[in-house]
Amino acid sequence: MGMGNEFNFRQKPRGLFKWLLHAPVWIFRARLGFLLGRRIVMLEHRGRKSGRLRRTPLETVHRQGDTYVLCSGTGRKADWYRNLQAHPAEALWVGAKRFPVAQRFLDDTEAAAAFATYEAAHPKAAGRLTEMMRVSYDGADAGRVAMVAQIPVVELTLQR
């Protein structure tokens, strides 16, 4: 049975899987984030209800200079995404460093372009993401735009 069939990524992770997803938090907090490579970053944000500081490891969809594009692989209901709608992101951990950020939500056309870049650079990972999200499209630009409506995308720019 493939990973897409074992877990429903459109629901909040629980149990051991939730613990595994948060293991990178400890790696970043120990200033060892560089061990996770250049695509994994950690987002710091505030809880929309509690106001408490939250940390979420995420994969970068696209990076250009100090600008990082992140997508919600679990859709619009992801806690981190909903938190960013209520309170702007506070910081992004890249490697062993923490940077304050400016945030911007991408519209569907911009998000589709970012996802196209991700697909070209990492076709297997992009395929796994669409499988986990249980979304698909015909490979055309219009289909990609419709698909990313279910996979929200945020752009964060490091403030040095």
Image (spheres, helix red, strand yellow):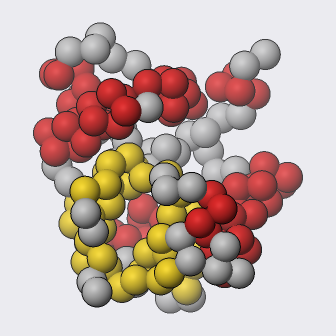
Q: Which image quarter holds the N terminus?
A: top right
Looking at this rendering, what residue extends furthest in the right direction? Answer: 16
Residue 39: x percent and y percent? Answer: 48, 52
Location of residue 129 with respect to 39 vertically, above or below? above
Position of residue 95 in the picture relative to residue 24 (left or right): left
Residue situated in front as seen by the camera: 97 or 46: 97
Residue 4: x percent and y percent? Answer: 65, 25
Residue situated in front as seen by the camera: 9 or 122: 122
Q: Which image quarter holds the C terminus?
A: bottom left
Residue situated in front as seen by the camera: 81 or 29: 29
Position of residue 23 in the picture relative to residue 151 (left or right): right
Location of residue 154 with respect to 51 vertically, above or below? above
Residue name at image x 75 percent, y 63 percent: 23
Position of residue 127 in the picture relative to residue 88 (left or right): right
Count how many numbered circles sit on residues in the image.
0
**In the rendered image, is residue 56 in sight?**
no
For residue 68, which quarter of the picture? bottom left
Residue name at image x 84 percent, y 54 percent: 15
Location of residue 79 with respect to 148 vertically, above or below? below
Residue name at image x 38 percent, y 54 percent: 70
Residue 59: x percent and y percent? Answer: 49, 52
For residue 154, which quarter of the picture? bottom left
Residue situated in front as seen by the camera: 70 or 54: 70
Position of residue 67 in the picture relative to residue 42 (left or right): left
**In the rendered image, is residue 97 in sight?**
yes
For residue 92, which quarter of the picture? bottom left
Residue name at image x 25 percent, y 63 percent: 65
